Image (cartoon, grey):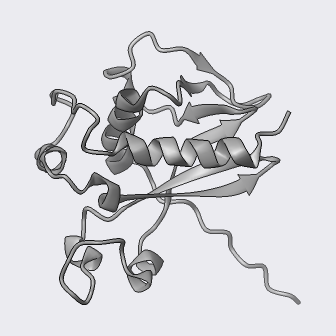
Amino acid sequence: MASSKEFLAYCLEQLEASLDSSVVEFSIDSTMVSAEADMLESSDLKQRYVFTSRKMFGEYCIYVQDFGCAPESRLTDSGSSDTPPAHALATQSPKPIFLLCDDILFAKPHKILESILPNHPKAPPYPGAREWYSMDIDNLLQLRKVIITLTPHLEPAKTKKKHRKQ
């Protein structure tokens, strides 16, 4: 059963809501670097991370773009920090962080998540896949932990090479 567009929209809303300042912040452990600690104290997490999705094999891949590395790119002409300008979006590389399969959100498996998700359930998102962390979309604090911890360790999405016609 393929994931619905409505559930995708709900997931994207929940991911953004998890970055809201009303969500209680978690304690910083030894796996996090000082730049992440500084970021946790700021109130602009919603502006730092932008989520997008792409339909793949009948399901969805959710990407995150981290604008924390270049805070000046988030400034608008008026000097306030709002949504990143379009030209800044074009220069950022999206990183695949979640899969949405059969209306279940799966977090990309990474060694760094073992410390914040011990004994967390894992399952393959599709037949033949390795196991990913099965996430509770309504647990905003857990989503926030995963986003903040995992994003700096992700590789940008691979671009497809264009084949030349002969």
- Is the residue 80 above or below the residue 110 in the image? below
Which residue lies at the image location 71% right of the left edge and 33% below the top edge?
103
**For this rendering, which residue is in front, 106 or 47?**
47
Q: Position of residue 86 (x, y in %)?
A: 44, 82
- Count up the numbered dots: 0
**For this rendering, which residue is in front, 71 or 12?**
12
- Is the residue 58 above or below the residue 101 in the image? below
Q: In the image, 138: left or right of 7?
A: left
Q: In the image, 20: left or right of 53?
A: left
In the current view of this chain or complex, which residue is farthest to the top? 119
- Is the residue 144 above or below the residue 20 in the image? above
Q: Quadrant of residue 140?
A: top left
Q: Position of residue 121 (x, y in %)?
A: 54, 14
Q: Which quadrant would the N terminus be assigned to in this image?
A: top right
Q: In the image, 28: left or right of 21?
A: left
Which residue lies at the image location 21% right of the left edge and 87% below the top edge?
78
**For this rendering, which residue is in front, 4 or 149?**
4
- Is the residue 134 above or below the residue 7 in the image? above
Which residue lies at the image location 33% right of the left edge and 33% below the top edge?
145
Q: Position of residue 58 (x, y in %)?
A: 82, 47
The answer to whether residue 111 is visible is no
